[in-house]
Image: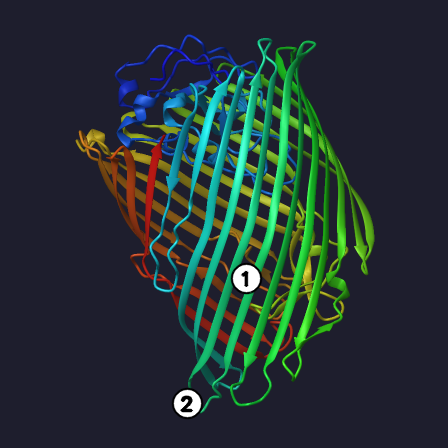
Amino acid sequence: MAPGSGRVLGVALLAAATVPACPALAQGQLDPEPADVAPVYNVPVSTARDIYYPADFASFGPRTALDMVRQIPGFTVDDRGSGSQSRGLGQANGNVLLNGVRIVTKSDSITDQLARIAADRVIRIELVDGSTLNIPGLSGRVANVIASSSDGLQGQFEWRPQLPAEYADMRWLEGIVSVSGTSGGLDFTLAAEGRPVRNGNGGINTFTYGDGSQIQRFSETNSHGDDKRLSGSLRYETAGGTLLNLNSSYLLRRFYLFDDERVIAPASAPPLTDRLDQNNRGHDFELGGDLDFALGSGRLKLIGLNSTRTLGATTVSVIDPATGDPALGSRYVQVSDSSERIGRGEYTWSMLGADWQWSVEAAFNALDQTGDLALLDPNGIFQPVPFPSGNGGVREDRYESLLSFSRQLTDSLSLQLIAGGEYSSIRQTGVDANSRTFLRPKGTLNLAWTPQQGLDISLRLERRVGQLNFSDFLAAVNLGSNNQNASNNELRPDQSWGLSIEGTRDFGAWGSATLRLWTRRWEDYITIVPTSTGGEARGNVDHALAYGTELHGTLRLDPLGLAGAKFDFNGTLRHSSFPDPVVAGAHLPISFLDPHNVEIDFRYDIPASDWAFGSGFRDTGHNPYYRVRESGYDYAIDRNLSLFIENKDVFGLTVQARVSNLLESEAVLDRQIFTGPRGSSPLAFREQRIREVGRVVNFTIKGSF
């Protein structure tokens, strides 16, 4: 239990659990509410389905709030909507709140935020159906983490070194160190993170040509990324209940990759070597915040965010025939500067027995990009070639207005309705200058039903507008796969209808399970399409359809006499289809929607000890990708078996060792290149590349200071 002293960062639901959340709760051992917890103004009373206290997670030895949330039976953290490619800020999404409030940032995810909160600051975690909250956009099970301010300064760290794999180097400096504290009415957190990448693999690459001849190459790749990030957050609450939040972050990007291939068979083949080098340099900056205060009969929240990103990438590909003939080579340099500025207002009030919210948002996105292409001449000097369609800019001004209505219809049924629309103007500069405007509706309908104790069912109907990647408007070259995208100044944002039904069943001491059925239909779906000049570009097709089912949950073995042991499982099945823009009458699957994924994790925390061990298994299916003259598979480690062992008190630290890829799964590229549009052109060659990854050994060391 958290102590009763210490000012609470936010406010909490005043509700009692209706379903036991753990053995301690099942035995009625509920700790009293901390005396300084005040009710959340925008959360209805008595909506919590389950309440978890720190004692419920003691056997896991958690160091952070994230460690606790990940151990909630049948609950999986959803970071939907986070990241630079999400459309504005919009309504709340995901399934985790902090002190009843959504996190207003795009550079951070909720998992980043939770990982900086020490476990001893957590007062409790409440599970509630998102549709019952006056936070428009939430649905299904939502975890509300109630945390107190730290008393004075408090620090914590997590270090995640990785031993060198078969073709990869040692990874030393991945991890995070953070310091949080309180000064008067001000709470603050500072964090520094290392996000290095050390990947590598190697193996045989077989080329089979249209005439049946073959050449084998040995292929090896190695990559080094050394991103570093500084972030900070401030929170201030006045005696009158006005809340101020500020968040900022700076990310320094550094990345280098080489890919080498050399011919090894047949003996008569020229001893060709092929090398690709890529260097990326850049930085991101974000500053955002919100001010929440009482106004009239409701509350007004004003939100602002400004982010910028600069990235320069240089890729060089050189093929040396090793016969004395001149080498062949290409160099592509791309520099992009992008920015996003968002202003948003949300006014929330109660009227006619319901909760209302009116929101308005203005977002201004911009991209300026240059692309320079050069070819190697016989003297070994790169000579520039014209590439005008790779230079230009894209601007989008977008305005959104939505009205939300939330009401408890009966004791067991609640409704949330959001309706509105957005207006956007997209302008492209450069040789393919163009300007267009769009006016599109959007909104959601959420129903939450609790037909009986321990069973929650929710339905969600959604109209969504997708976010464009502005780089898709301009031409670009990928020397690694020898592909080039043309520009497309007619690219349109996609729209989609989504429908999902989710049911969660609590099985008491046995655990919990959630089943979700969903479908989504897109209009103006974006994929690779042929151009009128014979090239290919990112473009729109009329529609796409996807549907699937997801099952995740936790099975505890305590009732069988094996206290501290459990299985966590996740399974998905998906089907997707859109009309093939190259082969008339054919349909293709959506490449990023894996047809199936199964994950099973076992963990055993040995009672009355600091030791835990377990294993995990994952099997993932993959859809092929398609271009105009190419199709194939590109994936790594489709099946993974891992083992771990953990001690929660090694000189006061938690130490875990994990070995992954015990099945020795490989990185696979299997593609077919045609002489013209696939389906109507003969095969030029097939490339079958299977690269060994090797076993991967990771350590995690967590502590506080």
Amino acid on which the number 2 mark rests in the picture: Ala
Q: Which mark is residue 572?
A: none
Q: Closer to the N terminus: mark 2 or mark 1?
A: 2
Query: 77 above or below 239?
Result: below
Name the residue nearer the viewer: 619 or 519.
619
Q: Which mark is residue 625?
A: 1
User: In which quadrant of the rendered view does residue 540 lie?
Assistant: bottom right
Q: Give the residue at x 55% y 29%.
A: 233
On the rendered image, what quadrant is the C terminus found in? top left
Q: Give the secondary structure at mark 1.
A: strand
Q: CA distance from mark 2 to mark 1?
A: 33 Å
Q: Give the residue at x 39% y 60%.
A: 169
Q: Is residue 448 left or right of residue 515?
A: right
Q: Position of residue 425 (x, y in %)?
A: 79, 43
Q: Give the residue at x 33% y 43%.
A: 700
Q: Is residue 420 left or right of residue 219?
A: right
Name the residue nearer the viewer: 142 or 519.
142
Q: Give the secondary structure at mark 2.
A: loop
User: In which quadrant of the rendered view does residue 586 lie?
Assistant: bottom right
Amino acid on which the number 1 mark rests in the picture: Tyr
Q: Is residue 582 visible?
A: no
Q: Is residue 319 left or right of residue 383?
A: left
Within 10 Å of disc 2 (Cα), the crowding (few <14, some 14-19, many 20+) is: few
Q: Position of residue 353 (x, y in %)?
A: 62, 11
Q: Position of residue 408 (x, y in %)?
A: 55, 16
Q: Is residue 326 visible?
A: yes
Which residue is farthest bottom? 268
